[in-house]
Amino acid sequence: MNQFLDFSLGGIANGAVIALMALALVLVWRSSRVVNFAQVGQAMFTTFISLWIYEVSGSWLLALLIAICAGAILGLVVHLLVMKPVRRADASGAIIATFGVLIALQAAAGMIWGGDPKAFVPPVANSGLEFAGRIWPVSWYDLLIFAVTSVLVLALSYVFTRTSFGLAMRASALNPEVARISGVRVSRMLILGWAMAGSVGAIAGVLIAPSATLSPNSFDLLLVFAFTAAVIGGLDSLVGAVAFGVGTGLVLSLVTGYSDASNAPIVSLVLLVVILLMKPDGFFSQSKSRVV
Amino acid sequence: MLELTGVDVTVSGLKILDGVSMKVPAGSITGLIGPNGAGKTTAFNVVSGFVRANSGTVTFKGKSINHVKTHQLAKLGISRTLQAVGLFPTLTVLENVMLGATSRNKAGILSESLALPWVDKEQRVIRQKSVEILRRFTLDSVMDAMPGELPYPTQKKVALARALVSEPDLLLLDEPAGGVGAEEIRELSALLQQLTPECTVLLVEHHMELVMEVCDLIWVLDAGKIIASGTPAQIRSNQDVLTAYLGEAEVS
Amino acid sequence: MRSRLSSHAFICIGAWLVLMLVNNAIEPLMSYYLALVAMYATAMFGMVILVGLSGQVSLGNGAIMAVGAYVFALSYQHWNAVISMVLAGMAGVVFGLLLGIVGARLRGPYLAGLTLAFAVGIPAIANRFPSILGGEDGLKVPAPNTSIAEVIQAPTYDESSLDQFLTDPSSAGVAPDPTSTVQTFDTSPLDPGSFALEHWQASVAIAVACIVGFVALNLVRGRQGLAWRAVRDDPVAASVVGISPATTKVTAFVVSSLFAALAGGVFAQILSFVGPGAFGLKLSLALLVGVVLGGRTSLVGALIGAVIVVWLPELVGSLGNGWNDQVSNNVPNLVYGLLVVAVVVFAPSGITGLVTQLRSFRQR
């Protein structure tokens, strides 16, 4: 039982990061009906930038802020230069283009920073806390991750549900034509969606980097996990992405704990297959398939 | 030929079809009319398997087709056109029509993959049939064009050719006169009359002149219910029909 | 009108003859590249059918290649190469069917994500059963004829060309050696043009590619090809003309998986080795990049794509003599990534599409 508790607690921090990345995927999906498979590539790139700033300045907070800005800019660039020009009718093309961006970003990062894994030293201790006479699988750094994630999720949900800006954003996602008629600037909402997603992904990247190592390919698995979480949540739902992101983290942590880390992608695949067999559109999805 | 009995369709709590019963006699041209939103297209979709009836039966040649999937209908001899034309944009006109003729094909994927001689022969027959029907529709000059390059009425003609090339027993036409000119409607009317009695036709149409001219039997649908049926003359003088259509379309 | 059987057979047998003559005339190193091109082409024929014609963007084919390669390697421990290839193909069909049954129900991005998970998950299975599948070390595929193999000292191939592709050099199955064994071949005692292991490997790869090409031609230019395109264009209209969208999509998965598994069997023989490192996400992405650049809907495009995927890294390598490894290793991928984006935006039907456009432009 203690072991179960340990594994579960250990999974929450990872789950929070998966949730953030899933959130980024959902933000892009909601704004432009595209799954941005380059999202982890963008996050990887901004994390490298952030690591560089961190090493130069020594300030983690500054590094995080720079990552947020860089993420927004990169999201914007990808949207304006790549995704916007792709023909709307070419659904496969949009998906393929995101993979093109992913490949290019990974190569560019490899050119600039090399392929060797780099360590990202956490700003606070990343070893288990001692409390009530035992060592818990939760570190100060994990607590920092919870804090950042919670603040971010709360802020986003406030923006989306309580502000007129959030309403406009939701409207343009659900029905761009109607939103346009009602005076919402849909193209601006698209840009904002991509920029926000870029920032959220960048935060996820900076947060996860200390727990793994940083290399051009090191976030590939995170993409699979985040996609799994986002799909289970229905791709449309912020709440779903967060809930199932944390859930996916928990399941993976339990699997890794009780068996072996290399099982994680297999479990993720099985999870995805089962969910998609039951609900081809995921849970919480509002979109309906086409009728004659 | 085709018979609907007590068909109910409810979509998210809304009753679209309410106990619809209607018959399409073999060899006839039967019309299904009604104001917008009456449920005509839904009735069509029930027959073609896109929408499942919550209760009631649909029979074709005496056999229930309630649970037959859309793509299996072609094999049974039911063919339909779509309101939105539904030509394949990246296939040429000839290829579009050829696909309509392949539903009764026997070649499986294995013999296809080896291009066995008899597969070739089957393909040639299909091609020939498709070219013939295009010629009959005076479309042979645009055989190699892409559908998007053609004017809308021509596209509709291609779609009709595609539906007819399989020599169906029952043809379901979803607003064939929508968006086409008077000349084409005259052509259409002549063609429909040529088709019967070998082929039975069920027609959903807003263009009253055409319906009144070609149909042997008309069913009128309003708010999901059949409110009248009869010959064009009977329908024309039916008070309920007039009421249902008031302000909707001029009854000629 | 000549029958399709004879004209397609003519094309494929002709291609086979020409390639075999070329194969016999070139040095072992070139033969090795020829084998890779033929192998990629085999897999990419399947990608044209799945991604181009049936419109299902899948990253699963690299994983299916792994399935084919492992089945080949396991079977080759007991039986001969032909039986092993047949078994590999059958395994491909089974996996294609399973993937298709799940995948054909899904809309674009869902399918891409599922197959992405598949591409990452399947190679991981190799690590789960180290006793059978050899874990990270993989399985050896012995050279076909020991006497030949001894003469040329059974080179252990690095995956240099694959490695440079979508690379993370550290994650490759076999450590790449810059002084590649392939180069030492030039100075091998054997005369260029004699029948080395590479020549044998290339002839296997060419034979498989030609057979697969024949089948692909028949399908693509027959009713099945029309059905795939119809379902991609408009599933509703397809079902109206009597084509089952579900079955047609699954068929595309099965056929492309068959091709991928056969390509995997060939790959196992080219590498003389099967390991999880060779079949990661980068292989799947390589297949996607190749067909997109060559032309998504054209078999000729697949051929062009296969050449690009094998040749571009070499070209960059030879151009980039002054660069350090960190840069030159990543140039091909950067080029691929940018090219893919450019092609999708400006020329969705790839190089073959550009050529067709140019030709019709000239005619006017």
Image (spheres, grey):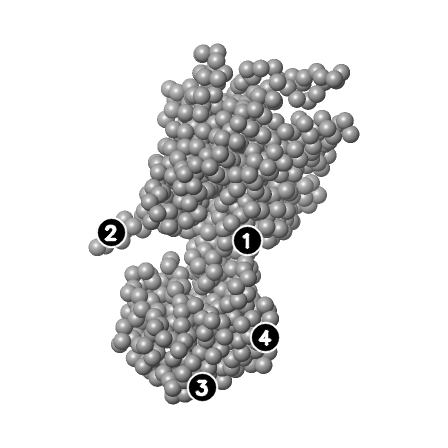
Say if mark 4 contacts mark 1, CB within 8 Å: no
Residue at x-position 29% and y-position 61%: B149
Q: Which residue is mark 3?
A: B230
Q: Earlier in the sequence, mark 2 or mark 1?
A: 1
x, y percent for residue C219: 48, 58
Residue at x-position 41% and y-position 76%: B244
Say if mark 3 contacts mark 4, CB within 8 Å: no
Q: Which label was assigned to residue C361?
A: 2
Residue at x-position 66% and y-position 26%: A10
Q: Looking at the picture, do discs 3 and 4 lie on one chain?
A: yes
Q: Which residue is mark 1?
A: C104
Q: Looking at the picture, do discs 1 and 3 lie on one chain?
A: no
Q: Whole-Å distance between the Cαs marked 2 and 4?
A: 56 Å
For the N terminus of chain C, the image quarter is: bottom left
Q: Chain of mark 4?
A: B
Residue at x-position 65% and y-position 29%: A11
